[in-house]
């Protein structure tokens, strides 16, 4: 099972406060543990919402709103992609995250859809197209 593990933003991350050397070292060690256990598939930190935008779609129209956005606790400051046997395993790994690196925030864990989750609507032709696209990503 794959999971997106989202680190929620806080005032510091939205203000662009960069982590200390101590925090970077702690996160590096944690990420190394994830890699060595075969759990980590990817992950990155994100710039503050002041450097981003939202594109809204409504009835065939789209509009753009440039950041910053209010309510930091509703924003994402970074993410990991985990592969674990269960949600509980993902939770157990998240609980090992150095709290000093997260600060006053929370981490949300959401399972990523797999091809099997879509049922018969995900036809063999659509599966083949998806597999071709994924193969291109690894080239």
Image (cartoon, rainbow, N blue to C red):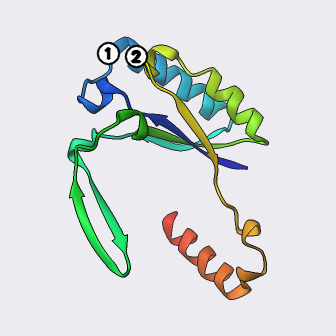
Identify the residue shown where x is 23% and y is 28%: 15
Residue sitting nearer the eye, 1 or 52: 52
Identify the residue shown where x is 21% and y is 46%: 51
Q: Does residue 2 lie above or below 25 as drawn?
A: below
Query: Mark 2 falls on what kind of element?
Result: helix
The Cα atoms of the two marked residues, 2 and 1, are separated by 5 Å
CB atoms at circles 2 and 1 under 8 Å apart?
Answer: yes
Q: Position of residue 31 (x, y in %)?
A: 54, 29
Q: Which residue is mark 2?
A: 23
Numbered circles on residues, count: 2
Which quarter of the figure has residue 83? top right
Q: Position of residue 97 (x, y in %)?
A: 57, 22
- Is residue 139 at all visible to an observer of this figure? no
Mark 2: few, some, or many residues within 10 Å (few <14, many ≥20)? Answer: some
Left or right: 92, with 78 as reference point = right
Query: Mark 1 falls on what kind of element?
Result: loop
Left or right: 55, with 82 as reference point = left
Which quarter of the figure has residue 130? bottom right
Res 20 label: 1
Identify the residue shown where x is 54% and y is 32%: 107
Q: Position of residue 113 (x, y in %)?
A: 66, 60
Left or right: 120, with 106 as reference point = right
Mark 1: few, some, or many residues within 10 Å (few <14, many ≥20)? Answer: few
Identify the residue shown where x is 39% and y is 41%: 75
Q: Position of residue 123 (x, y in %)?
A: 72, 85
- Is residue 95 at all visible to an observer of this figure? yes
């Amino acid at each position: 099972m794959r999971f997106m593990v989202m680190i929620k933003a806080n005032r510091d991350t939205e203000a662009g406060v960069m982590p200390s050397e101590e925090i970077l070292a702690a996160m590096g060690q944690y990420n190394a543990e994830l890699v060595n256990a075969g759990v980590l598939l990817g992950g990155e930190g994100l710039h503050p919402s002041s450097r981003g935008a939202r594109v809204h779609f409504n009835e065939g129209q789209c509009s753009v709103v440039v950041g910053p956005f209010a309510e930091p606790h509703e924003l994402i400051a970074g993410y990991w992609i985990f592969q674990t046997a269960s949600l509980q395993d993902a939770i157990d790994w998240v609980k090992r995250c150095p709290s000093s690196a997260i600060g006053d925030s929370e981490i949300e864990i959401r399972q990523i859809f797999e091809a099997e989750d879509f049922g018969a609507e995900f036809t063999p032709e659509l599966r083949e197209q998806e597999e071709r696209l994924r193969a291109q990503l690894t080239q």
